[in-house]
Each structure stands twice: as structure tokens, then as C-alpha cells.
């Protein structure tokens, strides 16, 4: 009973479960993480580090102040795991075929219309736990190229490409117009500027791609869309996900 904190719930029934959990945790093998990982690397083992959250939420390089409290870019592997930069071989960037954002913050390509709603419904863009609808829009090539630069991305996996199957027309943001001036750079504190996206338009492929297994079999217009993003980013879209299944991953050879 913690009267000083206005806490009056009886927690005695939790005690047994709590101490059982402690005993379970004592069974874990505790290692010195930086030595453990570097030892595996020296043995020729492959170590996969998965980043949390997106690059534009990075505390230093993201859309400040709408960011998280840590470094979400690939450099976080070095500071977080104690791995030297030269040990990193591949940096795999994961991007949707369109753009989404959760919560507040700048979103130049956001679609607050029927198209945005269609993207949201088709892509099931709702929070897994809260059901909160995500903000949706066209792919932002400016932000994506910036993310590739600061992360040193060597290849890209484009997810949810099948969500675009039903659209007659697609757009890619290739620049920002700010007070009439065009730029291809992400500005500092985007939320303070009147950003208008400069969009490149593509004809949609209007066909179901979810059953396709090979890049060569993809619709010509889909390949045009991917090829444009390849060239614009200067980084290859090495894999295209065309569905939620583990086998729905097409390699772009």
C-alpha cells in the first residue's frame, strides 16, 4: 500500500508470478554485447541489425521536432552495438511504394482526398494495436534520396507495390517548391516552410501483380515506375514485395 503516491491496489497476488519471472530471467546467458558481436564478425559470421522506426524520425537528421529520441539511421548500429563503420557491408533500405506517416509532422506528398483514402484502405494503413489511420501520400523521392544518402543505402526493398495495382495514375515527388524556388534537398525544419511537392506523373498498370514471381513478368508500366525510382535515387530497387506472403518477394536482377 503506497498511500503517499495514492496507490491502493493490492499487488500481493502478482508476487508469485513476479518472482517466477525473475527466476526465468536469471536463466538467460548474459554476454558482453560488443565483444560477442565483433567476435562473430571476426569468425566470418553474418550479423543482421534491424533498425527501429524510419530515417525521417532520427533525432539529428529527421523532421525535427517531430522525431523520436534516438538515432534511427544506420549509424546507430555503430553507436548502439559497438560495431566499427568499416564492418558494415550492406545497408538495406526498406521503403513502401508510396508514403505514409503516423502522427504529426511535415508530409509534403500527403493526399487528403479520395486517393489518399483509397491508399489507406487498400494498403490497410491502420495501426496494428490502436487502429489509428495512417496518413498516406505519393512516394517522396526527395526524402527517400536523402535517407539513402545519410544511411549509405546499397540496395532497396520496395514493399506493398501491389497496393498500387488498382490506380490509374501514380505520382513521384522529385523536388520541393518553397516560396517559388525549386529544391531537391530536404530543408531544415520542414514544418516551418510552405512546401509544395513537384510531382512526376506515371500511368498505372491496372492489373493484379500479387501472383507474379519474376521481374520480367511484371507489367511494363510497373517496371517503368521502378526504373524511374532506381535512376532518381541512384540506388537499385533490388527486391519488390507484391503481397504479405513470404514468397511474395520479386528479385530485380
Image: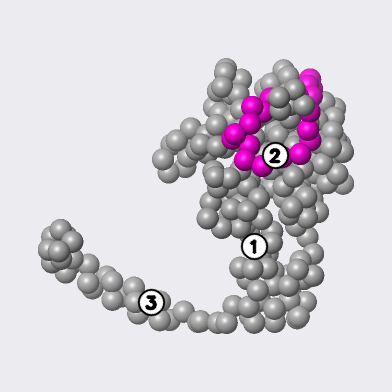
Can the viewer see residue 109? no
* Whether residue 78 is situated above or below residue 199 in the rendered picture: below
Whole-percent x and y of residue 175? 77, 31
Q: Which mark is residue 76?
A: 1
What residue sits 53% from the left and 51% below the top? 68
- The quarter of the rendered structure image containing the N terminus is bottom left
- Labels 1, 3: front one: 1
Q: Are marks 3 and 2 in contact (CB under 8 Å)?
A: no
Q: Is residue 167 magenta?
A: no
What residue sits 84% from the left and 37% below the top? 232
Say which label, 2 or 1, has the lower sequence index. Answer: 1
* Whether residue 166 is situated above or below residue 209 in the rendered picture: above
| Mark 1–mark 3 distance (CA, rounded to whole Å) | 30 Å
**Magenta range:** 182-208
What residue sits 79% from the left and 64% below the top? 89
Tell me the residue that label 3 is attached to: 24
Q: Is residue 72 left or right of residue 181?
A: left
Say which label, 1 or 3, has the lower sequence index. Answer: 3
Residue nearest the viewer, comparing 50 with 239 = 50
Residue nearest the viewer, comparing 6 with 50 = 6
| Mark 2–mark 1 distance (CA, rounded to whole Å) | 22 Å
Image quadrant in which you'd find residue 78: bottom right
Instruction: Determine crowd level at label 3: few under 14, some 14-19, many 20+ residues with C-alpha closer than 10 A.
Output: few
Q: Which mark is residue 186?
A: none
- Labels 3, 2: front one: 2
- Labels 2, 1: front one: 2
Can the viewer see residue 134? yes
Helix, strand or loop at label 3? It is helix
Q: Is residue 1 left or right of residue 208?
A: left
Image quadrant in which you'd find residue 177: top right
Q: Which mark is residue 187?
A: 2
Amino acid at each position: 500500500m503506497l498511500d503517499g503516491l495514492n496507490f491502493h491496489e493490492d499487488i500481493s497476488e502478482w508476487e508469485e508470478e513476479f518472482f517466477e519471472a525473475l527466476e526465468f530471467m536469471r536463466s538467460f546467458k548474459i554476454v558482453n554485447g560488443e565483444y560477442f558481436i565483433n567476435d562473430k564478425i571476426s569468425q566470418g559470421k553474418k550479423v543482421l541489425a534491424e533498425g527501429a522506426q524510419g530515417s525521417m524520425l532520427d533525432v539529428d537528421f529527421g523532421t525535427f521536432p517531430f522525431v523520436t529520441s534516438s538515432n534511427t539511421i544506420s549509424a546507430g548500429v555503430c553507436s548502439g552495438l559497438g560495431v566499427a563503420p568499416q564492418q558494415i557491408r550492406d545497408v538495406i533500405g526498406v521503403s513502401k511504394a508510396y508514403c505514409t506517416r503516423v502522427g504529426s509532422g511535415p508530409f509534403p506528398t500527403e493526399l487528403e482526398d479520395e486517393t489518399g483514402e483509397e491508399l489507406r484502405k487498400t494498403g490497410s494503413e491502420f495501426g496494428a494495436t490502436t487502429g489509428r489511420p495512417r496518413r498516406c501520400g505519393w512516394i517522396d523521392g526527395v526524402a527517400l534520396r536523402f535517407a539513402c544518402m545519410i544511411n549509405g543505402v546499397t540496395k532497396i526493398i520496395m514493399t506493398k507495390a501491389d497496393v498500387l495495382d488498382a490506380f490509374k495514375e501514380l505520382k513521384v515527388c522529385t523536388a520541393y517548391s518553397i516560396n517559388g524556388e525549386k529544391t531537391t534537398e530536404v530543408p531544415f525544419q520542414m514544418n516551418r516552410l510552405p512546401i509544395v511537392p513537384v510531382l512526376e506523373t506515371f500511368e498505372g498498370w491496372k492489373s493484379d501483380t500479387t501472383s507474379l514471381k519474376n521481374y520480367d513478368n511484371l507489367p511494363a508500366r510497373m517496371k517503368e515506375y521502378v526504373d524511374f525510382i532506381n535512376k532518381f535515387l541512384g540506388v537499385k530497387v533490388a527486391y519488390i514485395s507484391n503481397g504479405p506472403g513470404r514468397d511474395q518477394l520479386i528479385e530485380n536482377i
